[in-house]
């Protein structure tokens, strides 16, 4: 991964630089980083000696937890501080994370980014229109060629980015359907991806209109062999993208239908389970009647069909010999006796009683609502009827926050006690 990164950076380094401005050759890094790196050589050297740390932080980018102590094991503290000062990584207390611009750059080059951005396609379309307008108004042949070159570059980007966005969109749809546990969030994400699909389809139509109608004069007058090939390839890419979007739409519709059906089924199962636990299932539902009416094969006893030979087959000599062998195996000459169990010892017949004290969560809830503490401190300092360890208190905290979430105010504020990070939970104002 690091070799590919250095290759791209070296390629950018070889691009022409005007007036010594690094941002012209390396537009990815904004003016915020221009004050931290004097030239591209310094940037490449910095990425080179910090590559082990950057690789590990990039691989763990989704865990959102990378401690400073872990970085010290790979790199000296002075160099880590240098990376922080130069804006390559950011420090938040005892945690480190890659800067957003470097993170986005690595994801785009390695094609592992999960964000679907349609604004970049639209930006290239606008640039094409602008450069075509400049081309038609320019009289100098050299400048006209420069504008034509920019148009060709934007045409290449549109086809590549459109197909890349569709691949990312399909992957995100698949991952969301398979891994998102919350049905409400899963439906919202799939609907958002459907909006992305429509936006990409709209940009495809806009690009087609640009090539065939809106800028038709330019593509007729300025058409050379290279531009002709680019336009043909772009139309081919757009056709492929349009077909892929049709399959994407079918997949989204199928997934949404499955999720909504599963959600309804689970809600019904929860209701049936609740009524069963309350011993109200027969009184409040007609479930038994529906099961009788359904007459499903699933509830039928398993049928057995013994193989019976015909009388003619039984009279054959080979079958007769087989019957004699079977009869010899079955008839042992004596009846098998069932083994008798040994006498149970007297000490095993003595009943023993084991007592266990349970934590009453309802009592904890009432005490917490009556207090003015946050839930974590209340649970840690509560006087329990028996000895309760740290891990069990953390479990009680999670149970209380989950069971009584409608009565508690879970805030977007987090505190760590050195081992775990927990949210501030207060009683909801009544």
Image (cartoon, rainbow, N blue to C red):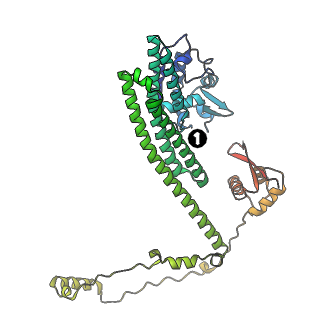
From the viewer's perspective, is residue 359 above or below residue 62? below
Q: Residue at x 56, y 48 (%)?
A: 191
Image position, residue 90 (x, y; %): 64, 29
User: In the rendered view, would you say 339 is above or below 57?
Assistant: below
Query: Which residue is painted at 52% across and 51% down in the image?
Result: 177
Nearer to me, 39 or 394: 39
Q: Is residue 235 left or right of residue 343?
A: left
Please state the horizontal and vertical placement of residue 231, each as a whole percent of the image.
40, 28
Left or right: 35 in relation to 153: right
Relative to 220, does residue 277 appear above or below in the rendering?
Answer: below
Taking 283 as reference, is 23 left or right? left
Could you say where residue 237 lies in the image, as x and y percent from the top left?
Answer: 41, 35
Q: Residue at x 19, y 83 (%)?
A: 319
Percent of width and height locating residue 430: 82, 55
Can residue 128 be seen at all in this image of the molecule? Answer: yes
**Can you identify the residue that label 1 sits on?**
63
**Number of disc labels:** 1
Among the 4 quarters of the image, the one containing residue 272 = bottom right
Which residue is rendered at x = 62% and y = 75% of the image? 285
| Few, some or many residues within 10 Å of mark 1 (<14, 14–19, 20+) | few
Where residue 89 sits, quadrant-wise, is: top right
């Amino acid at each position: 991964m690091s070799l590919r990164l250095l290759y791209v950076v070296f390629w950018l380094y070889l691009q022409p630089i005007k007036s010594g401005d690094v941002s012209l050759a390396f537009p990815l890094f904004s003016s915020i980083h221009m004050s931290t790196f004097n030239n591209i050589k310094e940037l490449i050297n910095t990425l080179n000696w910090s590559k082990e740390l950057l690789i590990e932080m990039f691989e763990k980018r989704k865990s959102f937890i990378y401690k400073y102590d872990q970085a010290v094991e790979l790199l000296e503290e002075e160099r880590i501080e240098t990376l922080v000062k130069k804006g390559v990584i950011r420090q938040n207390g005892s945690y480190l994370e890659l800067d957003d611009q470097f993170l986005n750059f690595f994801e785009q080059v390695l094609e592992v980014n999960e964000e679907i951005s349609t604004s970049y396609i639209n930006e290239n379309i606008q640039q094409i229109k602008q450069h075509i307008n400049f081309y038609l108004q320019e009289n100098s042949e050299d400048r006209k060629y420069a504008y034509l070159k920019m148009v060709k570059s934007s045409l290449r980007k549109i086809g590549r980015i459109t197909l890349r966005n569709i691949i990312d969109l399909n992957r995100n749809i698949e991952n969301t359907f398979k891994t998102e546990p919350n049905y409400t969030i899963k439906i919202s994400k799939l609907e958002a991806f459907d909006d992305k699909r429509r936006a990409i389809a709209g940009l495809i139509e806009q690009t087609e209109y640009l090539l065939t109608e809106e800028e038709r004069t330019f593509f007729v007058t300025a058409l050379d062999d290279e531009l002709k090939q680019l336009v043909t390839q772009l139309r081919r890419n757009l056709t492929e993208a349009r077909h892929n979007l049709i399959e994407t739409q079918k997949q989204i519709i199928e997934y949404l239908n499955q999720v909504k059906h599963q959600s309804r089924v689970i809600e019904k199962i929860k209701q049936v389970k609740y009524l069963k636990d309350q011993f109200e299932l027969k009184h409040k539902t007609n479930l038994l009647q529906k099961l009788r009416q359904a007459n499903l094969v699933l509830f039928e006893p398993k049928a057995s069909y013994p193989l019976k030979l015909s009388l003619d087959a039984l009279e054959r000599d080979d079958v007769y010999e087989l019957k004699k062998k079977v009869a010899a195996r079955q008839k042992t000459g004596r009846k098998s006796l069932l083994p008798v169990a040994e006498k149970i010892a007297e000490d095993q017949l003595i009943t023993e009683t084991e007592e266990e004290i349970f934590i009453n969560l309802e009592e904890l809830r009432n005490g917490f609502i009556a207090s003015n503490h946050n839930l974590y401190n209340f649970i840690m300092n509560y006087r329990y009827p028996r000895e309760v360890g740290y891990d069990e208190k953390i479990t009680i905290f999670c149970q209380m926050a989950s069971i009584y979430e409608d009565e508690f105010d879970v805030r977007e504020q987090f505190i760590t006690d050195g081992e775990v990070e927990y949210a501030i939970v207060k009683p909801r104002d009544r």
